[in-house]
Amino acid sequence: MTLLFTLVGNGASLGDAHTQTVVAYERGDPRPLYAQAIHQRDRRNKILLLSMEAAEQFREMMVRAAKDGFHLQVISAFRTHREQRILRKRKGDIAALPGWSNHQQGLSVDLAGTTRKIKGKRYRTILYWWLVRNAKKYGFYNDVPNEPWHWTYKGVRAHG
Ligand SMILES: [Zn+2]
């Protein structure tokens, strides 16, 4: 715990400006995570971070998507414990318990434009189907079926 508090306390920025050490949570337990920016900001102008490997793969996927005419706009990536607590308070059971969201491991992204509402009904968009076809090549999977916007990095090797 001492190590974690030290890292948070001085806002440690290791390496270049695009990487920083944050406190990740996995199954309720905190640990330091060396995270990398994905060169996008959220609506509050906060730099969006993912774990190193997930960030690298995501940026490659962004390039591929752009070639196919899609812009992968990230709404949410790594979340701090505080952000997850606030989200849980606001959304209730829809959001994972603080400490248990894979957003807190720096592995998940929420993407804009995966659904569209027409006459009160929500439909999956062409972007969503592009992700279904292509995201696995970069290790990303839609692991919450009723959240088409939520894509989690599970590694490229294990899933071929
Ligand atoms: Zn999500």
Image (cartoon, helix red, strand yellow):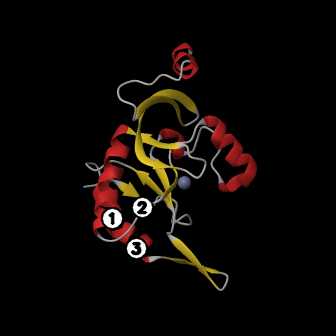
Number of labelled discs?
3
According to the picture, the residue beneath numbered tag 1 turns out to be 65
Numbered disc 3: secondary structure:
helix
- The amino acid on which the numbered mark 2 sits, given as a three-letter code, is Leu
Question: Horizontally, is 8 left or right of 61 in the view?
Answer: right
- The answer to the question of whether label 2 and label 1 lie on touching residues, with beta carbons closer than 8 A, is yes
Rounded to the nearest whole Å, what is the CA distance between mark 2 and mark 1?
A: 7 Å
In the rendering, which numbered label is found on residue 113?
A: none
Rounded to the nearest whole Å, what is the CA distance between mark 2 and mark 3?
A: 13 Å
Q: Nearer the viewer, residue 139 or 114?
A: 114
- Give the percent coordinates (x, y) of residue 7: 51, 20
Q: What's the residue at 55%, 63% (across, down)?
A: 147
Tell me the quarter of the image containing the N terminus: top right
According to the picture, the residue beneath numbered tag 3 turns out to be 129
Numbered disc 2: secondary structure:
loop
- Would you place residue 152 above or below residue 1 in this image? below
Counting residues from the N terminus, which is met first, the one under dot 2 or under dot 1? Answer: 1
According to the picture, the residue beneath numbered tag 2 turns out to be 72
- Would you place residue 117 above or below residue 59 in this image? below
- The amino acid on which the numbered mark 1 sits, given as a three-letter code, is Ala
Figure quarter occupied by ligand 1: bottom right
Rounded to the nearest whole Å, what is the CA distance between mark 3 and mark 1?
A: 12 Å
